[in-house]
Image: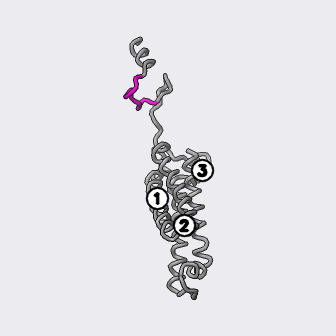
Amino acid sequence: MDVYYFYSYGTAAWLSLQAAPLIASPTMIVALLSPEVREASTLEVYFSRCLGFSLLAIGALNILLTGSVPLSSSLAEGATTSATDPKAPYALPTLTITAFYHAATAFYGYSLWTEAGVSSFALGTIGSGFFCAVALWCILFASSNGRISRKTGADKRTSGFPFTNKEADKRKKAT
């Protein structure tokens, strides 16, 4: 499940990249966003830094709850993200919630980009859209182990509709 780890660490890095200017220089953010150049108020600085710290907390929680960091003291146990793993029982719900977050952020960035035409909104849309797509891929394809047959190596959950599997039908008739 390397895609889980890529998504977890990538999301944390993306959120940290967004949080850095909010924490480091809220005055610059306010100056860039307001039509007139002015000093940021104490309330604007407070909300900017709180948002930055919240983004860092969401990134850290994403790494911890998806099981990317082993929460046990033994290194031999390792970190896995299987459905039966007690170390990562919240991997799929965390993945789903952060996918919704990335989708909402990408949609909001796209709407701002089409309205204002600022290229930084397009970059934010691309980044959040990419992580939304990776999360959806993980939810759809990497979250289930499948039921692989020991004899044929095929997934047992597949059906013959609309095409028939003539080789499987020959094996069934032979037994």
Q: Amino acid at mark 2?
A: Phe
Q: Which residue is mark 3?
A: 74
Q: Secondary structure at mark 2?
A: helix
Mark 1 burial class by Cα count in 10 Å: few <14, some 14-19, many 20+: many
Q: Earlier in the sequence, mark 3 or mark 1?
A: 3
60 vs 101, nearest the viewer? 101
133 vs 154, nearest the viewer? 133
Q: Which residue is mark 2?
A: 121
Q: Which residues are magenta?
A: 155-164
Image spot of residue 101 (x, y percent): 46, 61
Image spot of residue 9 (x, y percent): 59, 56
Question: Is residue 56 found inside the magenta-colored segment of the image?
Answer: no
Residue drawn at (55%, 86%) of the image: 36
What's the mark number on residue 103? 1
Q: Secondary structure at mark 1?
A: helix
Q: Are marks 3 and 2 in contact (CB under 8 Å)?
A: no
